[in-house]
Amino acid sequence: MAVPTQTNVSTLIDQYSALFFDSFGVLIDGVDALPGAVDLITRMNDEGTNYFVVTNDASVSLESRVKTFASKGFDIPQDRIINSGSQITGYFTENKVQDAPTVVLGTQDAMDYTTTAGGRLIELGGTEEPDVVVVGHSGPHDWESTLEKLLELFSRRFQQNNPVRLVLPNPDFIYPNGPGNFGFGAAAFVNLLEQALERLHGSHESLLATKLGKPYEPIFAAAVERAGTNHAVMIGDQLETDILGANRVGIDSAVVTTGISRRISPDEFEDVADELTPRYILASLV
Ligand SMILES: [Mg+2]
């Protein structure tokens, strides 16, 4: 059984060729910077540390994210942010669906990521049917009626041997929304749709969403490519996204105890599966 060890961020900086940081729960709590985070980023900028923010965000543009970080005191250059919204481009290229009629459920920025990737945006329920549906953000939708429309569409097109592609850039099921508050992520709604489709048609790969963010491989592959090394450590707060994803792609990981995970000592990981167990525990970024 894997057992994590306590460490601190300075040790990780010395030990690894690159550091990947989750955003929510590690650098910020949804409202403010977390203790030590601004000083750490400043120090890494000054020392030329090879670091990147690897975040499941797909709802705002990289430009706006840089500004949001700046408003909380962070100087994080845009090329140091790798988000799941940006992975939409790779999806459209690899699957050769540029110019496909595409529905985006999400913000204007989620739509912009998709048009940049080559998708041709249409409305759900219009005369033309989508070949791709990108679920970019959890709101603002009437989710019950939206899901019923999607269920009819995906079910019928599956039976017609012409399945619609379902794309989930941000696989977070829940997200921290300020101290003690949580919201349902887009993945919660996609999961409902996938389960309903499985009940109707059984288990089929084409009825599952392609997931681009953590814990899935595309965003980690992009981070490793940008960093120029896989001798990296992923620092995150969610075992099911940050830690599982890092373990899957074979990079080391550290869990911070400032976000969703409340486990703060190695013995609290005894009942945790190896694939969800980090190599390290960080009490804070200080
Ligand atoms: Mg997080």
Image (cartoon, rainbow, N blue to C red):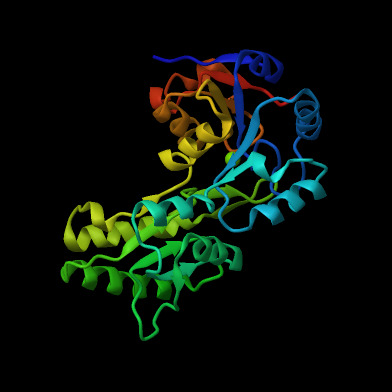
Residue 180, percent from left and from top:
66, 46
Tell whether 195 sits left or right of 36.
left
Looking at the rendering, in which quadrant would you find the C terminus? top right
| Number of numbered markers | 0
Asked whether, in this view, residue 164 is left or right of residue 213, the answer is left
Pick the front one: 127 or 176: 127
Image coordinates for residue 181, horizontal then vertical, percent: 64, 50
For this rendering, which residue is in front, 84 or 96?
96
Q: Could one spot residue 137 in this view of the protein?
A: no
Location of residue 71 with respect to 115 vertically, above or below:
above
Q: Quadrant of the N terminus?
A: top left
Task: Classify the position of ligand 1 by quadrant: top left, top right, bottom left or bottom right.
Answer: top right
On screen, residue 18 above or below 22: above
Comparing 62 with 198, the one in front is 62
151 left or right of 259? left
Instruction: Let me know if residue 32 appears in the view.
Output: yes
Question: Looking at the picture, does residue 125 appear above or below residue 226?
Answer: below
Residue 158: x and y in percent read 21, 66
Residue 13, how many percent across, how many down? 67, 19
Tell me the residue at 60%/37% (across/down). 22
Residue located at (54% from left, 16% from top): 266
Q: Residue at x 64, y 17 (%)?
A: 12
